[in-house]
Amino acid sequence: MYNAPHRDPEHADHVRNKAEAKAVNEASHLSARLVYHVVLREGEEELKRPNAALFWAGIAAGLMISVSVMAEAVLKAHLPEVPWAVYIADFGYCFGFLLVILSRMQLFTENTISTVLPLLTHRDGTTLWKVARLWALVLGANIIGAFLAAAFFVHTSALPPEMSTAMGKISVTATSAGAWENFWRAIPAGILIAALVWMISSGDHEYFLIITAFTWLIAAGDFQHVIAGSVEMAHVVLSGAGDLPELLVRWFGPVLLGNVIGGTAIFTLTAWGQVQQEVQG
């Protein structure tokens, strides 16, 4: 008879052979400690990537996240003017995130958890420098990509007039709140993106549903995401509907800070707290 390793003796008679042991393992969720190791490994691999690779992956993410705004505009342009229609249009917001995350591009807000775990683990100057380097490169590249995408939509006829109008309205609405409101709305978005990264690292393989559910919630809750929102900010600026310096102070800065606090100071530190004794013991 096969004795499955690391089983509770009380339930030893429940697993009779290798096939059953394999089935139990495949059906089991990873523990928090193992999910931590998965995210830690991914973060350490990202920190080792060369500057050029990070930069171009960040450009790609900034460009492709614009699909969220485009898809939302497409849906909004074709939906009736009724209260429930906005929640259907919000599903468009999911498309850019699905594209960026499943394509393994570099999205800044994902790095508020994945690259911070190595820093919490090693706690040295070298790791801090690597994290700062990656954050600066990826954030800068994401913003460049977002502006390039917005310029494409503003200065070409890629979108039909009704969709272009819808994108303009979405962009103005998304960037119209005050600084403090933007800050508070950015915190839940940072938490949700960090939680998303944690969940898709748990081995459940339901990536599509997880990404769709969490990013739809960001859109439906009118929460603020600094990179997807940068496409909207850039659209407002390039279309002449807003002033860049004013938006940087009122929108970009508060949203960036809120996303970092939500993703790193709240979710990542909480996740670290539940596994710290297990991984350092």
Image (cartoon, helix red, strand yellow):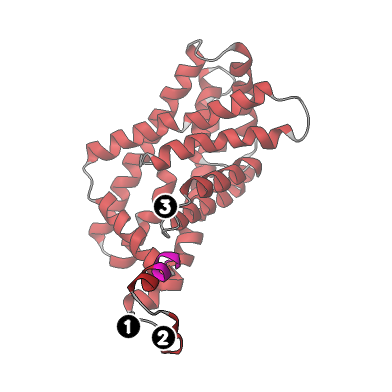
Check the image and report above or below for 120 versus 188.
below
Residue 218, image x and y in percent?
59, 44
Q: Amino acid at mark 1?
A: Asn
Magenta region, mostly helix, strand or loop?
Answer: helix
Q: Quadrant of residue 264?
A: bottom left
Q: Quadrant of residue 222?
A: top right
Look at the numbered disc 1 and give the secondary structure of its residue. Answer: loop
Residue 73, image x and y in percent?
60, 25
Look at the numbered disc 3 and give the secondary structure of its residue. Answer: helix
Answer yes or no: is residue 248 visible.
no
Is 276 placed left or right of 186 in the picture?
A: left
User: What stretch of residues is rendered in magenta?
Assistant: 23-30
Q: Amino acid at mark 3?
A: Thr
Q: Which residue is mark 3?
A: 112
Q: Which residue is mark 2?
A: 12
User: Mark 3 or 2 closer to N-term?
Assistant: 2
